[in-house]
Image: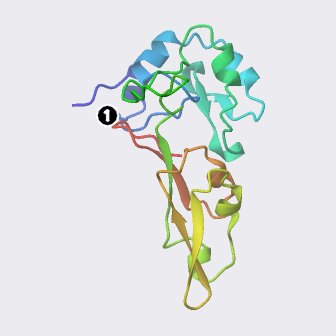
């Protein structure tokens, strides 16, 4: 059985599946809520205003406003280490001149192809144009259809594609055991 917080219990999330998206480099949820003092410094530091005050006053990411550019401003102002870069212990490259870190979060985009405008003979490439990681490309099909292809290895989960999709067929999902969905 999944361990759930009091807030999840009160919201009816008995399986512990609906967790909010936290700012990049957040500790796992159970530690994040212990370390975060809800000081709002990360909210104030976010130039793109993606970090908002969520339930309980804890910071959350709102991908409706745009995508995260991983500028590290929120990380730099966090005094309690609720946001913290974690060294990548699996990358033991002896030739590396710098220490490598785990990604800022474990989020990836997905596209519902059955509802995508581009797959339904409407010209739309908004998601591909907004993807700085070039994780979304379009393959031309017969009949003038351009099929979006998402390379999940290249996707950073920044959310830039989510905010520009006119019919919201792009979802941002957690690839951890906990389920986060925007």
User: Residue 40: in sight, yes or no?
Assistant: no
Judged from the image, the secondary structure of the residue bearing numbered disc 1 is: loop
Q: Quadrant of residue 36?
A: top right
Can residue 167 be seen here?
Answer: yes
Q: Nearer the viewer, residue 171 or 102?
A: 102
Image x and y of residue 153, in percent: 47, 51
Question: Quick check: 146 above or below 30?
Answer: below
Q: Residue furthest front?
A: 95
In the figure, is residue 40 to the left or right of 120?
A: right
Residue nearest the observer in this picture, 143 or 35: 143
Residue on which the image places disc 1:
14
Residue at 55%, 44% in the rendered image: 156
Q: Position of residue 128 (x, y in %)?
A: 65, 62
Report the front residue among 143 and 102. 102
Residue in view at x 52 percent, y 67 percent: 149
Q: Could you classify mark 1 by the number of other residues whose Cα lies within 10 Å: few (under 14), some (14-19), or many (20 or more)?
A: some
List x then y, in percent, for residue 20: 50, 34
* Quadrant for the N terminus in the image: top left
* Residue sitting at x 67%, y 46%: 64
Left or right of 108, for residue 52: right
């Amino acid at each position: 059985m999944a361990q759930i917080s009091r807030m999840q219990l009160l919201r009816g999330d008995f399986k512990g599946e609906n967790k909010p998206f936290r700012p990049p480099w957040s500790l796992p949820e159970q530690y994040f809520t212990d370390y975060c003092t809800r000081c709002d410094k990360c909210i104030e530091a976010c130039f793109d205003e993606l970090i908002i005050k969520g339930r309980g006053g804890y910071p959350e990411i709102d991908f409706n406003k745009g995508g995260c550019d991983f500028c590290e401003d929120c990380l730099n102002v966090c005094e309690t280490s609720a946001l913290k870069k974690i060294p990548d212990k699996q990358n033991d490259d002896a030739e590396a001149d710098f220490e490598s870190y785990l990604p800022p979060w474990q989020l990836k985009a997905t596209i519902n192809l059955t509802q995508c405008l581009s797959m339904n003979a409407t010209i739309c490439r908004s998601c591909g144009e907004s993807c700085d990681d070039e994780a979304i490309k379009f393959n031309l099909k017969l009949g003038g259809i351009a099929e979006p292809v998402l390379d999940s290895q290249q996707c950073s989960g920044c959310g830039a594609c989510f905010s520009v999709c006119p019919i919201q067929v792009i979802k941002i999902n957690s690839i951890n055991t906990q389920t986060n969905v925007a």
